[in-house]
Image (cartoon, coloured by chain):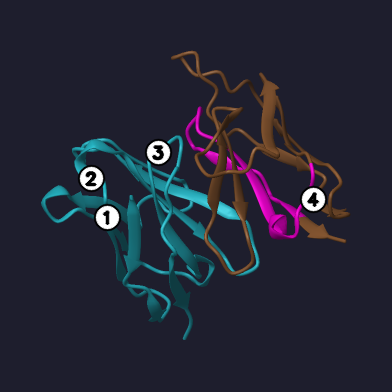
Amino acid sequence: QAQLVESGGGLVKPGGSLRLSCAASGFTFSDYYMTWVRQAPGKGLEYISYIGGTGSDTKYADSVKGRFTISRDNAKNSLYLQINSLRAEDTAVYYCARFARLLDVWGKGTSVTVSS
Amino acid sequence: DVVMTQSPLSLTVTLGQPASISCRSSQSLVYSDGYIYLNWFQQRPGQSPRRLIYKVSARDSGVPDRFSGSGSGTDFTLRISRVEAEDLGVYYCMQGTHWPFTFGPGTKVDIK
């Protein structure tokens, strides 16, 4: 049974940084594209980034380009999202999901709050 | 960017009655491989999203057969044949054809 578990969220001041992690289990992690999606409080879903199986293919939404970096460690079955220069509008629950176009498995999310 | 619109944005349905949600894209979602990457997700209150339908009409394992997806080109529909209490939540369509991939605004389904 494929499973994804996010961690690393928390309260951070504007301009700060965080590194989110997503631990994968139950499938061959390196075979799959992986995705980060976020959801601001009371709002809809926003697709922010994906990464290919080897890590060489990455894409970012304009809203996070230059501030967020997606990466993965296939030996550790882990996906990461480095988030820098945080703004209030980055406050959201961040979900990782399997696949880029199909998002068949989701984690429960990790919450990031940006506030002074 | 491809804009996904959904209608209605809110829907109250009587238990046992059908429901239908429309999703429209601002351009064709046919990808170069011939597939249409149009997915439907359900998000129950306090839960993470769950995929129900992928590639327009393929139902995920474990999803009740009262859920069905249809459509082509730019117009897509999610239908629930007989709404049950557990169907309460927000439903999102999402296109995975053109980068940036985008979600619709969501349709909130309440049960009467």
Return the mark for residue A89. Answer: none
Mark 2 — residue?
A: A29
Q: Of the residues under marks 2 and 3, which one precedes in the sequence?
A: 2
Please give the residue where the numbered disc 4 appears in the rendered image.
B9
Type of amino acid at the residue the image marks with label 4: Leu
**What colour has chain B?**
brown
Tell me what hue chain A is rendered in. cyan
Asked if the residue at tag 3 contacts the one at tag 4, i.e. Cβ–Cβ closer than 8 Å, the answer is: no
Task: Report the residue at 34% width, 63% height from top.
Answer: A5
Q: Position of residue A111 (x, y in %)?
A: 45, 72
Q: Are marks 1 and 2 on the same chain?
A: yes
Whether labels 2 and 3 belong to a single chain: the reply is yes
Q: List the single residue furthest toward the left.
A: A75
- Dot 2 falls on a residue whose secondary structure is helix
Residue A116: image x %, image y %? Answer: 47, 86
Q: CA distance from mark 1 to mark 3?
A: 15 Å
Residue B31 as seen in the image, left or right of residue A79: right
The magenta region covers B82-108
Q: Is residue B20 above or below residue A37?
A: above
Q: Secondary structure at mark 1?
A: strand
The residue pinned by badge 1 equals A24
Answer whether labels 2 and 3 touch (C-beta < 8 Å).
no
Circle 3 sits on which residue? Answer: A100
Measuring from the top left, give residue A101's x and y in whole percent. Answer: 45, 35
| Tag 2 and tag 4, C-beta contact below 8 Å | no
